[in-house]
Image: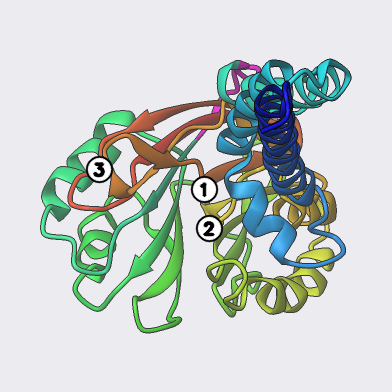
Amino acid sequence: MAPGSKEKRVGASVESGILTWRNAAGLLGVLAIMALAGGYLGALHPIGDSLAVGRAFAVIGVLLSAVLLNIAGLQIASFAATLFAMICGMQVFLAYYLPGPPGRLLIYQKNMHFENLELDALAADIRATNPLGITLQEVSEANLALLEGLKDSYPHQQVCPWGSVGGVAVASRLPMIEGTGFCAPGLAAVQVRTEDSQFWLVSIHLHWPWPYQQRDHLKTLLPVLAKLDGPVILAGDFNMVEWAYSVKALADVTRTKAAGPTLGTYLGYAPWLRLPIDHVYAPSGGRVEARGAFGSDHLGLLAGVEL
């Protein structure tokens, strides 16, 4: 064996290992950034909205990849990844932790779950919070008992059957304007009157996102909502986060802002994984707090909003 050949082979092996490590770190960084950036492309393809659901996790993934890139000696790429993650993460952070302005009109939002066995507890919480309006989803045949039991306080109701898990409904203390109540797929709406104004109260339940039919459902509902004349309060189970294209499109067409902060309301996956997919929107936004599950896989929301 020639002198130094062993050292050359070791050196080549080290260089090859470093190159492989850098390539792996670079590939992981690219994939993490693509997952995060893809969540902003919902207007181009509905897969973007599906990616947007995991934006907080994608931010964490990009930050971890930035650490690996730095270890691999790719400092410029690491800095760029860190900066991108911080910009995207700030949006999520503000959505979760920035409260909206307090409002006088109380709205109680609840996906009831079509097999709810705690209707009495839910009714008691609604009465205790004393909202002016209620928006409900998964109003199954059995869940109609809740609305019937609340008729003494909420006599003005619009119930719209929809889907295998139950329909949607709105109920209000405020008087309905005659002839305004209507149904659309996954939507119940009615115009109600206060002492000095009137507004639309709308309950919505969107389909699941891509690869399911949320985008097609959105295309059906946007023209319906665009025809509403006057202020709108829109609340429901959107099956989507507020920073996604589909929810922003609904906010734009109804000229509304989210009541904040966004809250993890869906409990169906794990106690530590709560998805923020239930929202309340109003012309001037508002402030929202979580209510208990009361037999559902969704927490309720109580929002004080303004017109």
Q: Residue sitting at 73 percent across and 67 percent down?
A: 46
Q: Residue sitting at 19 percent across and 68 percent down?
A: 115
The colour mode here is: rainbow
Residue 211, percent from left and from top: 60, 75
- Secondary structure of the residue carrying tag 2 is loop
Q: Residue sitting at 41 percent across and 74 percent down?
A: 167
Reply above or below: 189 against 69: below
- Secondary structure of the residue carrying tag 3 is loop
Circle 3: residue type = Ala
Q: Are marks 3 and 1 in contact (CB under 8 Å)?
A: no
Q: In this rendered view, identify the residue nearer to me: 303 or 211.
A: 211
Q: Are marks 2 and 3 in contact (CB under 8 Å)?
A: no
Q: Are marks 2 and 1 in contact (CB under 8 Å)?
A: yes
The residue at which mark 3 appears reads as: 293
Circle 1: residue type = Ile
Mark seen at residue 217: none
Residue 203, percent from left and from top: 54, 59
Residue 290 is a magenta residue = no
- Secondary structure of the residue carrying tag 1 is loop
Residue 231 in view: yes
Circle 2: residue type = Asn
Q: CA distance from mark 2 to mark 3?
A: 17 Å
Q: Could you tell whether 34 is left or right of 115 in the image? A: right
Q: Residue sitting at 39 percent across and 40 percent down?
A: 274
Q: Could you tell whether 282 is left or right of 175 in the image? A: right
The residue at which mark 2 appears reads as: 239
In the image, the segment drawn in magenta is 98-106
Bin the neighbour count of mark 1 within 10 Å (Cα to Cα): few under 14, some 14-19, many 20 and up.
many
The residue at which mark 1 appears reads as: 277
Q: CA distance from mark 3 to mark 1?
A: 14 Å
